[in-house]
Image: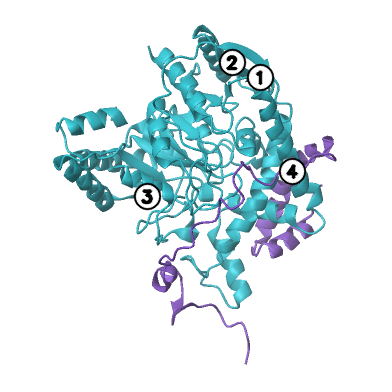
Amino acid sequence: MSQTVDSIRAELLAKKVSAEEIAREALKFAEAENPTTNAYLTFAPERALAAARAVDHKIAAGQDPGPLAGVPIAIKDVILTRGLRTTCASRLLENYIPPYDATAVIRIEQAGGVIIGKTNCDEFAMGSSNENSAFGPVRNPVALDRVPGGSSGGSAAVVAQGTAVLSLGSDTGGSIRQPASFCGVTGVTPTYGRVSRYGLTAFASSLDHIGPFSRKVRDSARLLQVMAGRDEMDSTSAFAPVPDYVAALDGNIRGMKIGVPKEFFDGLASGTGDVIQAAIQTLQKLGCEIREIRLPHTPFAVGCYYIICTAEASSNLARYDGVRYTRRSEAAGTLQEMYRQTRDEGFGAECKRRIMLGTYVLSAGYYDAYYLKAQKVRALVARDYAQAFGQVDAIVGPVSPFPAFKLGEKVDDPTAMYLSDIYTVTGDLAGVPCMSVPAGKTPEGLPVGLQVIANHFNETAMFRVADTFERASTT
Amino acid sequence: MKITEQEVRRVAELANLALTEDEIVRMTQDMDGILTHIDKLSELDTSNVEPMSQVLYDAEETATLRADVERKPLGNADALANAPVAGQGYFKVPRVIEK
């Protein structure tokens, strides 16, 4: 499928095809391709066809079918869909049927979007390679012996593969941008609070974001447009007005000041570095003023992030105790044994590691040394960005120190895996909008994403830089 | 070593995880590696920095309060639908209080 939101809309309104035909075709293609990548965990044929028929009825009645009319969309399996199994890629929730929809899902369907299935990911969104799924890893459609990145690996893969036009992921420390970079698609982490988290299974609540994947920047802008805005079901969702993101894509970035943080080039693989340098030159040719800037606390960000995210995770994951959500250990005797056995049998190794680390850093005697310290370092990371955005309109750099690696290559060294999040975690800690846009390939043919970061609620600047860059690199 | 097997056992108890002996050994190594990296934070003097617990934006003080309007709750049946054991409108757990 090389469809876009605009091409589908044009075909539907010209009555060349029906939304139902598009949905059937998409489901058939996705189901046929799935054995190759394992990117979908659940398909939703009934829901998809019902949504598609509703779009067709509106068109037949001469009504506006909505900004995402008939577009096949896949949803990361940590985002709740009423009546449609949502596993979080965990054995614990293997048969969990949510009783309500996430706000983002409601808004997508109200906009005419057609949800075709739920995508594989790292268990409870914890991982950088999608190898932590209880239902097997996802393979990168660009190179099947390699990981798609994580944690939203399935959502990146389905868009790269073309089995969905758009997808939703979640990002806590890079889980949208890194797989987007690895699979050669666009992935966006909006400003913290821009999209409601209601119905997103909580991992680290002060860092969690929902965001879009697409092949073209414009389509991510369209999807964000539909989801963004205040939701009274999420008290952290922002009141700030939502601008017209697509209207801002005027292809003109002449005179924009673009910062390049020196710290984002330490430890960068040469193949990736070359693509990023070429991208920076392209931006310069497009009329941007390139400035070297400093984000001096970057080297401390991974340590800070893994204290805060594990602390919050240990608290959020306490609810999976064998009482309310599906699975309970058969071995359970007493209440205490039931909790412990259920959690030991149900959680995979990475979730256990993070629950343990989070419990440790919050435990008596360690709180000040770890959690409080990390919150202070977080303030310094945020201050770095505030100072940088006093000088520049946007920041660019790499997303990941290296391109997609081989399956199994890094599973035995969790610390090394964590350190690879170095260029993405700072954006989440500060809450600024950031995205990955395809920038080129390494000599071995692996995609490399350019990260574009803007100030709080300045998604328009971020999208404008990425869209103009995309136009220049595809012509 | 930043953490011992004994400490790992204590943390596992706090976290309600029944780790196996093999898991304890592996967990101790992994946590040690990560905590060693985390030690880097002590290089920074943060004595005059206010902790940041959340990304906050300006809003009116009462902005996060919704209108005081009745609305339908989830309902008992839906709330219990995913419970492994339920009955009489309640979640069921192993006996806690002995007679």
Identify the disc placed on residue A374.
4
| Chain B on-screen colour | purple
Is residue A215 rendered to the left or right of residue A410?
Answer: left
Which mark is nearer the camera, 3 or 4?
A: 3
The residue identified by callout 3 is A106
Quick one: A347 or B50, which is closer to the camera?
B50
Label the cyan chain with its letter: A
Please state, as top left, top right, bottom left or bottom right, where the N terminus of chain A lies in the image.
top left
Q: Is residue A333 left or right of residue A218?
A: right
Q: Nearer the viewer, mark 1 or mark 4?
A: 1
For label 3, count other residues whose C-alpha is less than 10 Å away and answer few (under 14), some (14-19) or many (20+).
some
**Residue tagged 1:** A391
**Alpha carbon separation for disc pair 3 and 2:** 38 Å
| Distance (Cα) linking label 2 and label 4 | 31 Å
Q: Determine the residue positioned at 59% across, 37% down.
A: A410
User: Residue at position x 19%, y 43% from top?
Assistant: A58
Coordinates of residue A463 in the picture (x, y in percent): 47, 25
Sequence order check: which comes first, mark 1 or mark 2? 2
